[in-house]
Image (tube, rainbow, N blue to C red):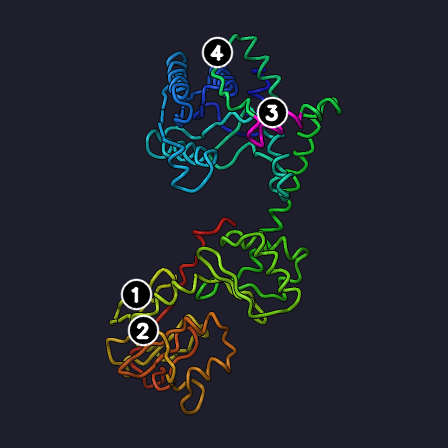
Amino acid sequence: MLKKFIRGIKSAGLFEPDDRILLGVSGGMDSVFMTHLFYRAGFQFGIAHCNFMLRGKDSDEDERFVRNLAEQYQVPVFVKCSDTGQIAGEMGISVQMAAREIRYRFFEEIIETVSPGFKYVATAHHLNDQIETFFINLSRGSGIKGLAGIPVKTGHVIRPVLQFTKYEIENYINDFELEFRNDQSNDSDDYFRNRIRHFLIPALDQISTGFNQSIAKSMGFIEEAKGIYNAFLEKEIQRLLIPTLSGYSIRIDSLLQSPSLHVILHEILQNFGFRPAQIKQMASCIRRKTPGKQFFSKNFQLLIDREVLIIMPCKVNLEEAGSHPFIVNKNDKLSLDDAYSREFEIEIFENPGNFTFERSPAVACFDLAKLTFPVFIRKWEVGDKFNPLGMKGFKKISDFLIDKKINLFDKEKIQVLISGEKIIWMIGHRIDGRFAVTPETRYILKILIKNRIFAANLNI
């Protein structure tokens, strides 16, 4: 068993022999099994335990057992006590989800701040856990990612006993006469996982000899297929998801070229908080070519326009951000409200004589001598007019927007730059020709919009 354990770690490349590993130990059979293997293998390790305060004195006894285990092996122990039931109520999630959140946050806290010498966190998931997870995800209509099961390594979390069955673990515990704590909730059929564990898997095991190993082999094939799927998905997202000045856009004609419209949409839009039912409805609208439909998640809104899908922060936030003017002085670096997620960088330099305009909506250049400071940024208003560069005479911004077929989202958030009560720039679109750089211009004021896109919110 020890040789199989060490061989599995090497073959999966989980960690190096001199790495320090933090073990998540509940005191149950599985984590005691893992801890004993680490001790026998001579690896450097410490123990982390969460007292979830869910089972009264039993929870305290679990904690005491784990502390004694750490003392027996002469390794450091870290313990966190949390009122999991109260936290679950405050967060509006299940007790199981709250416990998982508490546990993994505690692990990260230890390896990042409390004791940074630990390189990985090890959990005691085993092969039966893997198979149970497969059937849970299968029953929920999970895609290829869910059916691949629990990965042996995710970031700094490793699962070094994932190859062992529950039967092997029980035999090992008996052979070495190891003590462990029994969580009675594992015997209850109130939980879906337990019903799969107690009824479905034993029935399948009777029907097919070696059922566990066969499922594990199939899940290995699915894991390999997931790698191919993820590589394809990454390329598709890079091809389809285009950063804009206000968020992202997806061209509908490019989206329709994908082999599976609904799957690609789901993989992209779930990262923006849109629900599966919404994404299914979006796919239907795209196929039926019905533009103008809007969808909202907690932080984002999506518009199905004529040719593109437009994703941007929620409308309410944008209206709040644009309700007040912003003042810009020379050499300012101005950050607007996070709802716009963009910065205005201002630079002044001498005309080099061979100056050419940058053909980018994110850049505007002006003759400095023609400007009056400070200049103001505000939302456009009905009746606003300016002299668009390249056009003769004045034009209402409302008419300009119609001519350029600007979508509803962008109309609502468009701002203008004002100098001396005159509009000098319809920001992100066109400057006023009266303030443009000419051969006679001595100094140039350049404004560059930098988009702080919402990548921090994504998981792609």
- For the residues marked 4 and 2, what is the alpha-carbon distance in whole angstroms? 70 Å
Q: Which residue is mark 2?
A: 377
Q: Secondary structure at mark 1?
A: strand
Question: Disc 4 marks which amino acid?
Answer: Glu
Look at the numbered discs 4 and 2 and tell me whether their residues touch, using CB distance below 8 Å. no
Q: Which residue is mark 1?
A: 334
User: Would residue 248 be seen by someone viewing this image from the given angle?
Assistant: no
Look at the numbered discs 1 and 2 and tell me whether their residues touch, using CB distance below 8 Å. yes
- For the residues marked 1 and 3, what is the alpha-carbon distance in whole angstroms? 55 Å
**Quadrant in the rendering for residue 355:** bottom left
**Quadrant in the rendering for residue 104:** top left
Q: Residue at x 63, y 46 (%)?
A: 229
Q: Is residue 72 left or right of residue 218?
A: left
Q: Is residue 68 above or below residue 381?
A: above
* Front position among marks 1 and 4: 4
- For the residues marked 4 and 3, what is the alpha-carbon distance in whole angstroms? 22 Å
Q: Is residue 309 above or below residue 10?
A: below
**Quadrant in the rendering for residue 431:** bottom left
Q: Which residue is mark 3?
A: 163
Look at the numbered discs 1 and 4 and tell me whether their residues touch, using CB distance below 8 Å. no
* Front position among marks 4 and 2: 4
Which one is earlier in the sequence, the residue at label 1 or at label 3? Answer: 3
**Magenta residues, start to end:** 189-201
Q: Residue at x 33, y 74 (%)?
A: 378
Front position in the image: 56 or 364:
56
Q: Main secondary structure of the magenta part?
A: helix
Question: Disc 2 marks which amino acid?
Answer: Ile
Q: Badge 1, how many Cα within 10 Å: few under 14, some, many 20+? A: some
Q: Position of residue 336 (x, y in %)?
A: 33, 64
- For the residues marked 1 and 4, what is the alpha-carbon distance in whole angstroms? 63 Å
